[in-house]
């Protein structure tokens, strides 16, 4: 739970860092196809909420 809260705060206030961490995780995932990876990268670009959506709905992590 603490890790999730830290990730949310990171996504809101330090979005560029959260975006880079999300993209690294997306690119390294083996369970996603190319189109899904591309879409999650685009969604993660949205300031503040993009990385949070990736964590909650995409099953991802920032570290």
Image (cartoon, helix red, strand yellow):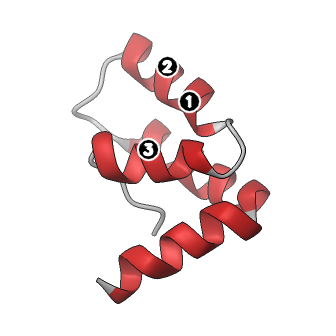
Disc 2 from disc 3: Cα separation: 12 Å
Q: Which mark is residue 3?
A: none
Q: Earlier in the sequence, mark 1 or mark 3?
A: 1
x, y percentage for residue 54?
A: 42, 44
Residue at 66% from the left image edge and 52% from the top image edge: 48
Q: Quadrant of the C terminus?
A: bottom left
Instruction: Give the residue number, with chain letter if any, for mark 2.
Output: 39
Contact between labelled residues 3 and 2, with CB atoms less than 8 Å apart: no
Disc 2 from disc 1: Cα separation: 6 Å
Q: Which mark is residue 43?
A: 1
Contact between labelled residues 1 and 2, with CB atoms less than 8 Å apart: yes
As helix, strand or loop, the secondary structure at mark 2 comes to: helix
Q: Residue furthest left?
A: 31
Task: Tell me if 45 is positioned left or right of 32 in this view.
Answer: right
Q: Which mark is residue 53?
A: 3
Contact between labelled residues 3 and 1, with CB atoms less than 8 Å apart: yes
Looking at the image, which is closer to me, 8 or 41? 8
At label 1, counting other C-alpha atoms closer than 10 Å, the crowd grade (few under 14, some 14-19, many 20 or more) is some
x, y percentage for residue 35?
A: 42, 11
At label 3, counting other C-alpha atoms closer than 10 Å, the crowd grade (few under 14, some 14-19, many 20 or more) is some
Q: Earlier in the sequence, mark 2 or mark 3?
A: 2
Q: Quadrant of residue 61?
A: bottom left
């Amino acid at each position: 739970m603490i890790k999730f809260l830290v990730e949310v705060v990171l996504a809101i206030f330090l979005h560029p860092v959260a975006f880079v961490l999300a993209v690294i995780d997306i690119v390294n995932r083996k369970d996603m196809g190319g189109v899904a990876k591309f879409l999650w990268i685009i969604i993660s670009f949205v300031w503040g909420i993009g990385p949070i959506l990736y964590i909650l709905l995409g099953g991802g992590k920032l570290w």
